[in-house]
């Protein structure tokens, strides 16, 4: 055990900062939260930091090359998705608004690209629901301008997928949910803004993890599968062999 959070929360984000501290932001505790706190490993303690401009959950948080943290999308108190985004500055402990998404979304993925830009892909839009509003759109955030630019759509909508930056600079999006569990995978090429299909997973799954290994391969583990009305947790794992072509399994 280590020091307790100052506020109970779920569906929040936790982001390691350049200082070594960890920023925990927003989430849910019977109501949506806009509070944030910092964990200090040196003292095993938590301290409050500036509150977000909007209470939200099911958002993403991405550390930028500048050291600022980009929080994107999520659900608002009305249980509708938001297109808002904001930046946390660790040097001041304050949040500021930045450019809004073209499409409101939650349960999406956000991936820092080699360029320092951020790719946001898929997720759900509209009202919070288990099986509605699946998105296949994607857009890229430029920290230099605070502007979002739409890029090519994914071949199919998906939510609760994973997105992993490969050594090639491409992004592997794997599996997820689109009214049924998916075994599909696609690669995003930042140089063209386009998606291409790659080898399918062996097992359909969502809510899994995807971890880049030192070899450049990707380990996909666990998750759930079966039908929306009867989920089965998985113990299986598989390796995506990225190689030079990023296209073998």
Image (tube, rainbow, N blue to C red):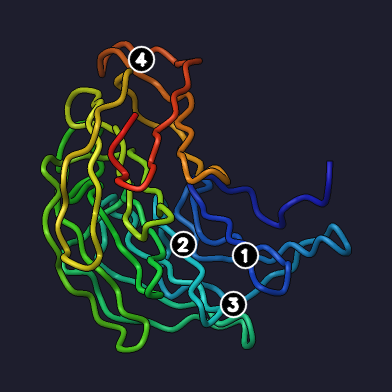
Q: Which mark is residue 61?
A: 2
Q: Earlier in the sequence, mark 3 or mark 2?
A: 3
Residue under the image location 82 percent in, 51 percent down? 3
> Which residue in the protein does label 3 denote?
50
> Which residue in the protein does label 4 denote?
231
Marks 3,2: beta carbons within 8 A: no
> Disc 3 versus disc 1: distance between alpha carbons?
11 Å
Work out which residue is located at the far right of the displayed protein and give it: 43
Residue under the image location 33 percent in, 39 percent down? 161
Residue 219 x, y percent position in the rendering: 48, 33
Residue under the image location 58 percent in, 48 percent down? 9
Residue 171 x, y percent position in the rendering: 32, 53
Q: Which mark is residue 23?
A: 1
Disc 3 element: loop
Going by the image, does 41 lie left or right of 177? right
- Does 13 appear above or below 225? below
Q: Residues within 10 Å of mark 1 (few under 14, many from 20)?
A: many
Labels 3, 1: front one: 1
């Amino acid at each position: 055990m280590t020091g307790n959070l100052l506020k109970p929360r779920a569906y929040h984000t936790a982001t390691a900062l350049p200082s070594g501290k960890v920023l925990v932001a927003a989430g849910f505790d019977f109501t949506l939260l806009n509070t944030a706190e910092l964990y200090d490993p040196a003292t095993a303690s938590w301290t409050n930091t500036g509150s977000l401009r909007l209470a939200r959950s099911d958002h993403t948080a991405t550390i930028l090359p500048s050291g600022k943290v980009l929080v994107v999308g999520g659900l608002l108190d009305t249980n509708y998705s938001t297109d808002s985004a904001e930046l946390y500055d660790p040097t001041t402990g304050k949040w500021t608004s930045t450019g809004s998404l073209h499409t409101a979304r939650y349960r999406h993925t956000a991936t820092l690209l080699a360029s320092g830009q951020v790719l946001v892909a898929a997720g759900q839009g509209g009202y919070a629901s288990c099986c509605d509003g699946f998105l296949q759109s994607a857009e890229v955030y430029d920290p230099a301008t605070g502007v979002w630019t739409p890029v090519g759509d994914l071949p199919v909508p998906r939510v609760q997928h994973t997105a992993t930056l490969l050594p090639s600079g491409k992004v592997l999006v794997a599996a997820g949910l689109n009214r049924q569990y998916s075994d599909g995978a696609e690669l995003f090429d930042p140089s063209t803004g386009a998606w291409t299909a790659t080898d399918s997973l062996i097992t359909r799954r969502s809510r899994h993890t995807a971890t880049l290994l030192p070899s450049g391969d990707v380990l996909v583990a666990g998750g759930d599968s079966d039908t929306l009305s009867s989920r089965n947790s998985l113990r299986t794992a598989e390796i995506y062999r990225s190689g030079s072509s990023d296209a073998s399994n």
